Image: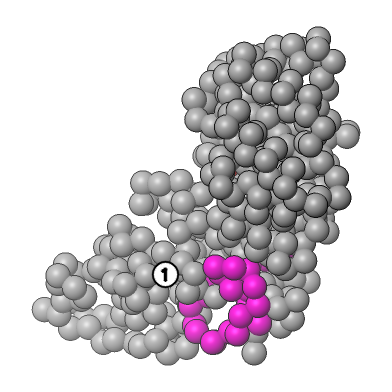
Amino acid sequence: MTAVASAATGAPAQATGRATRAVVDLDAYAGNVRAMRRLLSPGTELLAVVKANAYGHGAVPVARAAVSAGATRLGVATVGEGAVLRRNGIAAPILLLGPIDRGEARTALKLDLEPTVATDDLLEAVLDAARSLPLARPPGVHVKVDTGMRRYGADPEAAVALAWRTADDPMVTLLGCSTHFAAADEPDERFTRQQAERFDRVLSRLAEVGLAPRLVHAANSAAALRSRRYDYDLVRMGIALYGLRPSPKIDLAAGMRPVLSLRSRVARVIELSPGDTVGYGRTHRVDRPGRAALVPIGYGDGYARALSGRGWMGIGGRKAPILGRVSMDQTVVGVPDGLDVEVGDEVVVLGRAEDGAPTVEALAMLTGTIAYEVVTAIAARVERHVQRDGRIDPDLGSV
Ligand SMILES: *Cc1c(COP(=O)(O)O)cnc(C)c1O
């Protein structure tokens, strides 16, 4: 019945009706975008980061929701991710956040994606591509400054030279200048301030030679949530728009809430007797009569095997502990005492504590990782069901 957005491409896919699915609440997402827009300095634009299939939420429906809710730009990590958005008719400006291969420059420009350059080599490739293509206008590029992350970016001195070269060539436009914070989610803000000061010095140097890129940007979710100091012309937000905190030390703005829940249904009710063991390796031994429920989800769905014997799911609003090992496609949970469970009953694998389920953050904690990785790990075979106006919309995923 329900149309879904294919996890891998965001393109329409036929729902199979598999019990295990991710429900993506676009009302929540749009509400989060609006909450952040209210918080930002007047004139600061919001770029919605939709890389990695919108952090596992489905790139195309999320990108559309972002733009309708007032995000003026989108950000992706790869040219392939940008291609998916363009193929699905998304016309908003799209920034390539990180390095691309020089061989990809031509495709990037054809798709009207904005490269982030940090080396002469990539700038050269972008210029070559621009010269060889019949483009309507010179493509905009962003020059990235490494102010202390020591990841992508040009050192301050080199960035000034690169910006100069970019501005000097009529084949391209110096559209943006950016940096990225290494520790904006830490309670101690000193390093973030130092990075911003280094960035400001680069901007002053640019101004001295008459260069004023239209889009100066630095903030990720953590920086945008904690202070207006880092707003500049644009903030680049991913995790917070999905209703997840960048770290447990940074709070979301009022009214922001999680977008994704992972749901399934009971596939079998198992009567357990003392002496039984459950699952591979027989790691769970039954010591009293009880019942268990089989849930058709496993590490092949991105549900971490590290949850074996440790995690839980929500059934009937109660916590149902994982018994034994998570296998590739199936997991067994204990049925809480006194709970009546039947085949087909809803299981909330990941969601709200009120449903008895672990939140994304709780699950991240359990498996020793961060919220980002939990949602990004949800596998392509898990169908994404798009929820809007309070209901799971049969059309939205396929438009
Ligand atoms: C992924 C990314 C972001 C978004 O980070 P969040 O912490 O999810 O807000 C911002 N900027 C760059 C360069 C990124 O790669």
Q: Examine the image and state in which quarter residue 38 appears.
A: top right
- Which residue is situated farthest in the front direction here? 132
Query: In the depicted view, which residue is nearer to us: 177 or 193?
Result: 177
Residue 36: where, in percent of width, then height?
A: 76, 43
- Is residue 229 placed above or below 258 in the rendered structure? above
Q: Is residue 392 visible?
A: no
- Is residue 244 placed above or below 270 in the rendered structure? above
Q: Residue at x 14, y 70 (%)?
A: 281
Left or right: where 3 falls relative to 357: right
Q: Residue at x 66, y 50 (%)?
A: 106
Magenta stretch encompasses residue 10: yes
Quadrant of the drawing holding the N terminus: bottom right
Q: Secondary structure at mark 1?
A: helix
Query: In the depicted view, which residue is nearer to us: 382 or 398?
Result: 398
Three-letter residue code for mark 1:
Asp
> Magenta span covers which residues?
3-26
Q: Examine the image and state in which quarter residue 323 appears.
A: bottom left
Magenta stretch encompasses residue 308: no
- Is residue 22 placed above or below 341 in the rendered structure? above
Q: Examine the image and state in which quarter residue 117 appears.
A: top right
